[in-house]
Image (spheres, rainbow, N blue to C red):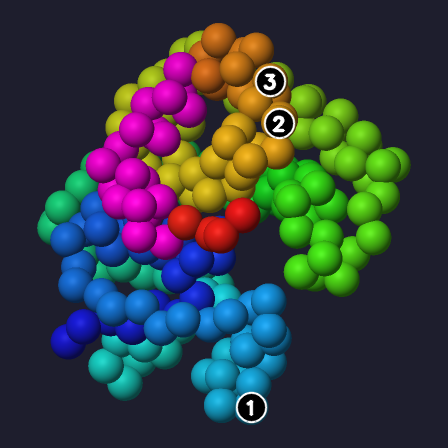
Amino acid sequence: MVVKVYGPICAATKRVLLVLIEKGIEFETVHVDVTKGEQRNPEYLKLQPFGVVPLIQDGDYTLYESRAIMRYYAEKYKSQGVDLLGKTMEERGLVEQWLEVEAQNFHPFAYNLVIHILFPSIFGVIPDPKVIEESEAKLEKVLDIYEERLSKSKYLAGDFFSLADMSHLPFTDYLVNNMGKEHLIKKRKHVSGWWDDISNRASWKKVLEHYRAPI
């Protein structure tokens, strides 16, 4: 059964595409134009009542929220493709810890920067210099913690690539390549080396080749 992935050009959906590619899972994409509000169409809301992407349909199984979908496929196909969860319970615990760090500490500030600098018109936001300044300052502090962590291990959860690293790719790519905020990454030796590593994975290059947002 081919997995259907809704909203492939959106950043959060790219997390899902990465897992599917790393696991060698066949999928097809369904375009949802968020710039036209298609995520709020009645038919889509029947599948995703909050009106956001991503969403997957796998046979008669429907699931939304990008990190939940990532975990689902990483677990369901754990023995297939790249192991993204770790080999022991302790490694799995660290993967989950850093996934939560990404969701709770990294993403909110990166998201604010992206919305206020890159996509204000799409989301109906008036760019707020104070929000931009405060978000960047808070992100700096988060990345200082990442620098310390990555001085001790190749990847966030240890010496293996995992969901924790993968989840950072879409929004960090915006920061580095579309917003003039690459200094946040590049001035930190270990964060910069980590970014160069994960952003050069074949799976990420494939996602960008086929599903890059029209910025």
Please name the residue that numbered disc 2 is placed on: 180
Q: Secondary structure at mark 3?
A: helix
| Predominant secondary structure, magenta span | helix
Real-space Cα separation, disc 3 to disc 2, in angstroms:
8 Å
**Which dot marks residue 183?**
3
Q: Is residue 54 left or right of residue 80?
A: right
Q: Is residue 199 left or right of residue 127?
A: left
**Percent coordinates x, y for residue 30 in the rendering:** 36, 73
Viewer can see residue 52: no
Please name the residue that numbered disc 1 is placed on: 42
Real-space Cα separation, disc 1 to disc 3, in angstroms:
42 Å
Q: Is residue 75 left or right of residue 69?
A: left
Q: Residue at x 48, y 36 (%)?
A: 173
Foreground disc of the pair 3, 2: 2
**Contact check, label 1 and label 3, Cβ < 8 Å:** no
Q: Amino acid at mark 1?
A: Pro
2 or 1: tag closer to the N-terminus? 1
Q: Residue at x 48, y 18 (%)?
A: 191
Which quadrant of the view contains residue 130? top right
Bounds of the magenta segment: 193-211
Q: Amino acid at mark 3?
A: His
Q: Amino acid at mark 2?
A: Gly
Q: Is residue 138 left or right of residue 51?
A: right
**Contact check, label 2 and label 1, Cβ < 8 Å:** no
Disc 3 residue crowd, few under 14, some 14–19, many 20+, Cα 10 Å: few
